[in-house]
Image: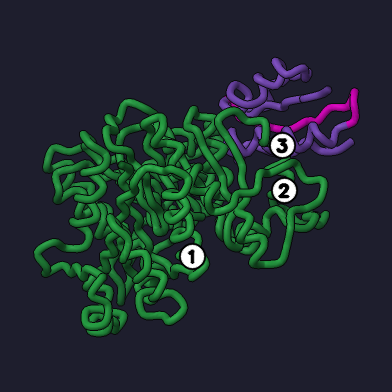
Amino acid sequence: MTEPMDFTELTCTNLMIKLKILLNKLPQGDRVAFFATREQVDNTCSPFSGQGYQVSWDQAAENRYLVRLGK
Amino acid sequence: MVSSTFLFCDLVPGERLRWIAETLRASKGTGGVPLSMTAFLTGDALYSLVDARTRDSWRTLADRDGVRVIADGDELGLHGLRDLVASGSPWVTVAGSQDEAPFWQSLVSSLVSEWKGTQKAGFLLCDGPYMSRVTVYMVRFLSAVQAGGFSPELYTYLDGVHALHNGQRPSEFENIGRAIAGISASSVQAGRDPWFAACSRCATARGYYQMNPGTGFCEPASAIEEIAIRPLKEILSRFSGNLPVVSSASGDLVPDGWGGDRVPRLLVFIAHPPYCAEWTFGGLSLALAAAMGGIPATVIFIEDGVYALHGNHEVPAHDKVFNVQEMIAVTTDVPDLEYFVHGPSLDDRGIDLLPGFPTIPRLRNEDLARVFLKSESDGTASRLIFF
């Protein structure tokens, strides 16, 4: 099991780019897991659900969320 | 008529002067509107006025109607060029701080006459203090903005965020931290509204914005109070406004009749190779964040920046760096963002685009003229920033 990546220090723009790159390489049915801040979840992760991806998250600590993004 | 003001503080390669000259020439041939251009040169850019590889290009440019070249007289003296330029280049206006129209005040005047109605002017600082004298030029510029009755704005980005380090105590150089604090204080005292900010990503990377484990949020560390740490998107929201923004290599295109009622376009020139320094990543991030914030952004890979699109970039497994080709490939669908590559820059280097790479339109100089003057047709101003 791979450790979730920590993306909490990426800007929302760079997180969006990182996720698009990861999703491009992701086989259908797989998902990526990573840590993000509340702002990143709201601004960058949530909008992926409108693009046909599955997005879910759980709070891991104050302002730290474990996000799962799959296709 | 479109007015244009350029500021160059760094070395100006002959290649840049050639494409600027050819683009200007082409703009006439393509039915472009008349362009009035003033180029302000300071720092290392002054060498291009005497260098045999570039001086004739400047002279040819200056011979054109509506083109003026203004050199920083104080910096000419520092660089040992004042007599040479004053006597050998009558087409250059030398403006020192003791002259009737000092260099930095002239620059501010030129900018605010284009950006009609503006109450402020900003500097995008990408270089750190002491290693780079660009920070001194930033201080000169913002001081002139403040003295001219306008509110100064400072956006520190990439290594520019080092300007916010507290406790700066250079023995031989002007104290940049103290200078920023002084401009801020005098601006507030004069009833103006200074806005000084540092990019939070860049500040975090350099240790000025640290996570408080108790709250889970970042807080400034070792930072002067006058510069707030803000997300890049918040800094870029300032670019939506009616104000000139300069950097160490920058320009603008402002059509007559500009009323400041539209969002200015952003033209980002990626002119450095992709990986050894942060220029390419920084320029791309800025353009993307701008586009995602509703500012139409155009990225042009030019000069050594074309190496970003050549060859197949593979990040080694142990390395941690953004693959700029992947970054470009996944963002070609971002609304309000367009990519171009300068064909002559590829040709000069004898290289081409990576086969199979998403299509990036190739621009000739006459096409570049159209991109430059696109804003004129819809009455929108453009900001040009070189990375």
Residue B77 in view: no
Residue B176 percent coordinates (x, y): 31, 61
User: Which residue in the protein does label 3 denote?
Assistant: B330
Q: Is residue B253 left or right of residue A41?
A: left
Q: Name the residue type under label 3.
A: Val
Residue B238 percent coordinates (x, y): 37, 35
Is A3 drawn above or below residue B278 in the view shown?
above
**Quadrant the N terminus of chain B occupies:** top left
User: In terms of secondary structure, where does tag 3 sit?
Assistant: loop
The chain that appears green in the image is B
User: In terms of secondary structure, where does tag 1 sit?
Assistant: helix
**Pointer 2 chain:** B
Q: Name the residue type under label 2.
A: Gln
How packed mark 1 is, by other alpha carbons closer than 10 Å (few <14, some 14-19, many 20 or more), is some
Label of residue B18 in the image: 1
Q: Nearer the viewer, residue A4 or B151?
A: B151
The colour one sees for chain A in the rendered image is: purple
Residue at x-position 18% and y-position 69%: B96
